Amino acid sequence: MAQTKHTQILIIGSGPAGYSAGIYAARAMRNPVLVEGPQPGGQLTITTEVENYPGFEHEIQGPWLMEQMKAQAARMGTEIIADWIMSVDFSKRPFTAIGDSGMIYSADSVIIATGAQAKWLGLPEEMGLSGFGVSACATCDGFFYRGKEVVVVGGGNTAVEEAIFLTNFATKVTLIHRRDELRAEKVMQQRLFNNPKIEVIWDNAVEEILAESEPRGVTGVRLKNLKTGDQSQIKCDGVFVAIGHKPSTELFKGQISMKENGYLIVEAGTTKTNIEGVFAAGDVTDEHYRQAVTAAGLGCMAALDAEKFLAEHE
């Protein structure tokens, strides 16, 4: 017979939002249970240098920062479990969730912090070069390309915004798009076309990311023209994939209100979802900023919202 574990606050997912929620929920003496999910620590575990998280004079490593957050949450009293939630039932309280281990989690309130994943091109060398010239976050990694040449792949608002942002550091930014027109807003396109540092290559797809092993790093990309079939190469020091992010919210379809793109909808200025007692924090709700510090802040908010909810219903 499956075991059942009850908690006042169940946190689904780790990363800055989940661990921060655990810290604050534990400080409120709510004995929270945090189920880490398939990628403990979230996206920062595949990020190398972090220079923009407050409180650190020098750059730190993303995995190290997540280890520190996890240790702090555990020290405060959060029970952290290496499991993966496979299904949830938010139709009645206490809410229930079933883990891949078979464990049944019962909770008076739930904080969803399952994060989001960058969409990638699907190239075999892509993941191996993450942190070594391949990135999905210009805000996170743009600084490391000061005085260098970079490529941005995509054609929507994200790609255009990242290309423009990268001109603050790079000497040249090449935007590669598989179509002959951009999907981005017209005002953003105009800024892009007016920037002398940016070149746009139309109707091309990245076929391969070229790299050296010693020292490990990107040296260029091989392109294929989708209209003519012609192939070409571009030298560059970095490749930024900007074809969007996908929130990890499949688990909550049909139970939590969400936008067409999968991001969970919360009440303005709070982390409250459409279900009383269920809260959402971090990249599952944030499709604009997607920063570790904003996710941590939302995790704090979710824990405070959950604490207030529990206090009102005791």
Image (cartoon, rainbow, N blue to C red):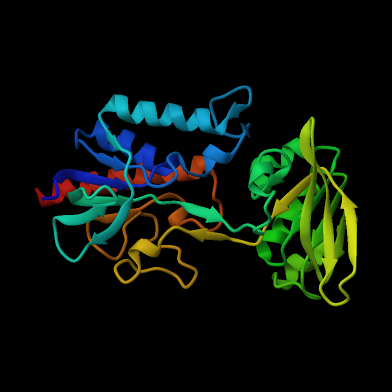
* Residue 214 percent location from the top left of the image: 79, 30
* Residue 82 percent location from the top left of the image: 33, 39
> In this image, 199 relative to 123: left or right?
right
User: Residue at point 66% right, 43% down?
Assistant: 128
> In this image, 174 relative to 305: left or right?
right
Displayed quadrant of residue 225: bottom right
Q: Is residue 256 visible?
A: yes
* Residue 111 percent location from the top left of the image: 30, 50
* Residue 35 percent location from the top left of the image: 31, 43
Numbered label tally: 0
User: Residue at point 56% right, 57% down?
Assistant: 288
Displayed quadrant of residue 53: top right
User: Residue at point 77% right, 70% down?
Assistant: 178
User: Residue at point 31% right, 72% down?
Assistant: 254
On screen, 119 above or below 35? below
Displayed quadrant of residue 156: bottom right
Which of the two residues, 297 or 116, is positioned nearer the viewer here?
A: 116
> In this image, 64 relative to 255: left or right?
right
Q: Is residue 265 visible?
A: no
Which of the two residues, 106 or 112, is positioned nearer the viewer here?
A: 106
On screen, 283 above or below 16? below
